[in-house]
Amino acid sequence: MRTEKRRILISLALFFVFAGIFSGAENIAAAQIKNISQAKEKALKKVPNAVVTEVDSDYEKGVLTYDVEMVKGNKEYTIKYRASNAQILEFGWEKMYVEPGSQNEFMGKNQCRQLARKEVKNGKIISCVKKMNDGVDIYKLKLKTNKKKFTLVYHARTGEMLEYEWERTATPSKNSKKGYIGVEKAKKIALALVPGAVVVKAEFDMDDGVPVYEVELIKDNYEYDFEIHAKTGKVLKQEVDWND
C-alpha cells in the first residue's frame, strides 16, 4: 500500500515538473516576436491608439530586431524590440511641432537639471547643453542609470519636454575589459582631435555589441561627440554641433 502511494506521489511530482517545463517553454515562445504584425501589435499595446507609420526588421550583430515608428497626437514614437524575447531595447518620442516661445525668459540650467532628475529617478546627469534647434532654444541632457542611458530635451524658455528617449546599456565584466584602452586614453584621443577642449562626458558603452567609449567635448561654441573603439582606439563616429 505504501509502495503504491509512493508511486502515485512520484508520478504527480514528475507531472508537475514536466508541466512546468512545458509551460515555461510556451511562455518563452509567446514572448517572441516572429513577424512584423506581432511587432506592430506589441507597439500598439505600449502606445495605445497610436497610428503605426512604419515597421522594419533588421539584424544587428546577428540579433534580429524590429523597429516600429508611430504617431499619436503631436508626438512621433520609435520602439526597438529584440525579436527573441520581445524586450524593448530602445524607446523614445519627439514632438513634431513646437512653439518657439521667444517671448519667455530662459530657464536656468539648474532648473532644467531638476526637471530631468524628477523624470529619471536615480539618474546621473552626464551633460546639460543649451543650444538652438530649428529656431527653438533647447536644453539637451544626457543621463545614465545602471541599465539605461537617457536623452532628454527641454524647451529652454517654457520647460516643456520636447524629446524623450532611452536605450539599454550593457556593462562588461572585469574579465571582458581586459585589453581595453581605458577611459583616460579615450579622452586623450578625443582631445588630440580638438586641442583646448573641455571633456564633459566620458563613459563606456556597448553599441550594437561593439565596446566603445563615448566622449563629449565642448570648445568655444561647439559640442563634439566621439565614439571610440574600446580595444583599438579607432574613432568610429564623430559629430559636431553648435553649442549656444
Image: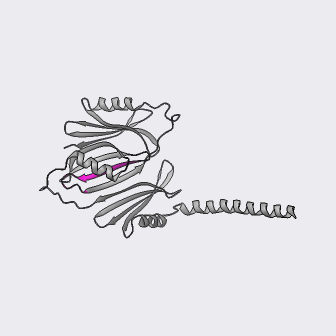
Picture coordinates of residue 142 (x, y %)? 32, 46
- What residue sits 38% from the left and 52% below the top? 166
Residue lying furthest bottom: 49
Quadrant, the N terminus: bottom right
Q: Is residue 83 left or right of residue 163?
A: right
Q: Within the magenta stretch, is there residue 153?
A: yes
- What residue sits 36% from the left and 46% below the top? 123
Residue 192, quarter of picture: top left
Picture coordinates of residue 55 (x, y %)? 41, 62
Residue lying furthest right: 1
- What residue sits 80% from the left and 64% below the top? 8
Q: Up-down: is 124 above or below 46?
A: above
Quadrant, the C terminus: top left
Q: Is residue 12 left or right of residue 57?
A: right
> What span is colored magenta in the figure?
145-160
Q: Is residue 23 left or right of residue 238?
A: right
Q: Return the residue nearer the eye: 39 or 16.
A: 16
Q: Within the magenta stretch, is there residue 158?
A: yes
Picture coordinates of residue 200 (x, y %)? 29, 37
Q: Up-down: is 168 above or below 57?
A: above
Q: How is the image coloured?
A: one colour
- What residue sits 51% from the left and 34% below the top? 174
